[in-house]
């Protein structure tokens, strides 16, 4: 569980000031994006389960209180309040794995304003990393033509927590496995792995290295063949594969990690097939992303799977999503800011999905489309049975396939239609005029 101290200081100072000034009214904050990243036509919502599980156990420990006391900033009454603090509010959200677009709230917190304010940093942090990576991974999945995809990013992800969330988000968005052993334990994701070039180089010869590995893992041998001459490496892997056959095992695969993999894969496939080893899989890794995967498959290269690492694990071409967490209702009244360039719509909202377009409406409106925001938590307790990760993955894949073909393009910028309901638009205009002083006369 995450400590409530995992927050920005101003969340705590605002919380204290709210309470000191008697502001205990209920507030609603919504999490959304105003614009999608430049290279994204859609985003995938992820990270909800972590948020819900944490909020159920959100408590300040005695060590947390001692640290806050040491800052000599907060009055004793506030520290006493925090000692008894637990989240008492409600959470509405989209299902994990749901594609979303601009101005669509993916999550709403309804709680006394001090509580809802405290959660901003944590909620944004958790939803951001998970949705960022799931959105990138979904793009790879959408062009992979059903080939096996494995997350190989752990060594270059941004820390331990990010490494775990990357593995989960990639799996959620259609990947089949991860190299991250801890993610396998925590989330039940299948784990895969071969060897590094250092293993090959530590032996006197490539053949010796291949035989050494096959000796220890005869039923799960995937050989890295590009340490020296790749074509020669494939030939040596074939010899080791023949030796495995004599012992009652089969060479599982070879991995290409460098060079012109489009041509090398074709050569490797020919050599393997000629040796009667059509069952041996060809795995490609090294600097892959959706563009490279599509390029390789479009060339007709006979690749069976991809180990995708850094560029997905860091979402290298779009390294952040500009999420905002905004107060939309206070004490039963819709509110909004009018800052230039930071448009937002007031009031609690719902998103309805139709075939090919969405409608963002006020929460009390009814449309024939599918409502996307659901109740997940009431009075600080989860009230909806949460799906397993495997079920979330199945749902996400279904949702990706349901998107219009043009929206799935990884090269062209395509805008998915998001309509704002007439009632919400009227409320926005009326409140804007009122706030800017234009409603009089």
Image: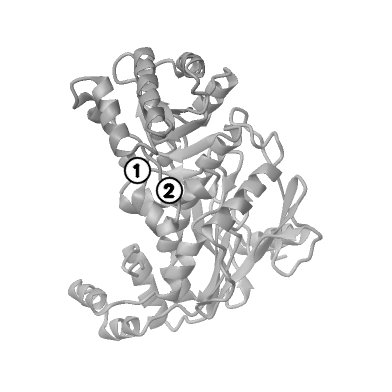
Give coordinates of residue 195: x percent, y percent: 31, 33
Q: Nearer the viewer, residue 197 or 38?
A: 197
Q: Nearer the viewer, residue 12 or 417?
A: 417
Task: Tell how many labels.
Answer: 2
Q: Quadrant of residue 438?
A: bottom right
**Screen quadrant of the N terminus:** bottom left
Q: Nearer the viewer, residue 350 or 425?
A: 350
Q: In this view of the protein, can residue 252 be seen by the observer?
A: yes
Q: Residue at x 55, y 34 (%)?
A: 147
Horizontal placement of 381 versus 199: left or right?
A: right
Give coordinates of residue 435: x percent, y percent: 60, 63
Give coordinates of residue 334: x percent, y percent: 63, 69
SS of the residue at dot 1?
A: helix
Give coordinates of residue 106: x percent, y percent: 58, 58
**Circle on res. 170:** none
Circles 2 and 1, Cβ within 8 Å, touching? The answer is yes
- Residue matched to label 2: 167
Marks 2 and 1, Cα distance to the nearest angstrom?
8 Å
**Circle on res. 154:** 1
Q: Residue at x 39, y 39 (%)?
A: 219
Q: Residue at x 48, y 75 (%)?
A: 113
Q: Earlier in the sequence, mark 2 or mark 1?
A: 1
Asked if residue 223 is positioned above or below residue 217 in the image, the reply reads above
Q: Nearer the viewer, residue 201 or 400?
A: 201
Q: How is the image coloured?
A: one colour
Q: In this view of the protein, can residue 195 be seen by the observer?
A: no
**Screen quadrant of the C terminus:** bottom right
Horizontal placement of 218 versus 276: left or right?
A: left
């Amino acid at each position: 569980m995450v400590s409530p101290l995992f927050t920005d200081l101003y969340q705590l100072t605002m919380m204290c000031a709210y309470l000191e000034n008697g502001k205990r009214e209920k507030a609603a904050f919504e999490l959304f994006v105003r614009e999608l990243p430049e290279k994204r036509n859609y985003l995938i919502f992820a990270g909800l389960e972590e948020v819900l599980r944490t909020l159920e156990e959100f408590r300040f420990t005695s060590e947390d209180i001692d640290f806050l006391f040491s800052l000599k900033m907060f009055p004793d009454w506030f520290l006493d309040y925090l000692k008894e603090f637990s989240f008492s509010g409600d959470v509405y959200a989209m299902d994990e794995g749901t594609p979303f677009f601009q101005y669509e709230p993916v999550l709403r917190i309804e709680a006394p304003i001090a509580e809802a304010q405290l959660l901003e940093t944590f909620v944004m942090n958790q939803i951001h990393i998970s949705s960022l990576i799931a959105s990138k991974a979904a793009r790879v999945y959408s062009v992979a033509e059903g080939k096996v995809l494995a997350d190989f990013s752990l060594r270059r992800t941004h820390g331990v927590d990010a490494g775990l969330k990357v593995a989960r988000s990639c799996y959620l968005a259609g990947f089949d496995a991860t190299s991250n052993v801890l993610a396998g334990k925590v989330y039940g994701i299948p784990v895969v792995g071969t060897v590094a070039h250092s293993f090959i180089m530590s032996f006197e010869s490539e053949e010796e290295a291949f035989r050494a590995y096959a000796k220890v893992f005869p039923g799960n041998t995937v050989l890295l063949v590009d340490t020296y001459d790749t074509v020669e490496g494939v030939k040596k892997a074939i010899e080791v594969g023949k030796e495995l056959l004599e012992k009652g095992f089969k060479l599982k695969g070879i991995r290409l990690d460098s060079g012109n993999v489009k041509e090398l894969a074709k050569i490797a496939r020919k050599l393997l097939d000629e040796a009667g080893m059509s069952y041996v899989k060809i795995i490609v890794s090294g600097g892959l992303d959706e563009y490279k995967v599509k390029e390789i498959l479009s060339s007709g290269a006979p690749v069976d799977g991809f180990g995708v690492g850094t560029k997905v694990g860091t979402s290298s071409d779009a390294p952040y999503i500009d999420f905002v967490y905004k107060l939309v209702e206070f004490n039963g009244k819709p509110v909004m800011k009018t800052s230039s360039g930071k448009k937002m719509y007031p009031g609690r909202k719902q998103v309805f999905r139709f075939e090919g377009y969405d409608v963002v409406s006020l929460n009390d409106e009814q449309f024939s489309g599918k409502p996307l925001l659901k109740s997940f938590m009431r009075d600080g307790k989860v009230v909806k049975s949460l799906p397993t990760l495997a079920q979330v993955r199945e749902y996400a894949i279904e949702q990706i396939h349901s998107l219009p073909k043009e929206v799935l393009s990884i090269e062209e910028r395509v805008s998915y239609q998001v309509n704002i309901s007439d009632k919400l638009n009227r409320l926005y205009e009326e409140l804007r005029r009122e706030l800017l002083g234009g409603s009089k006369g």
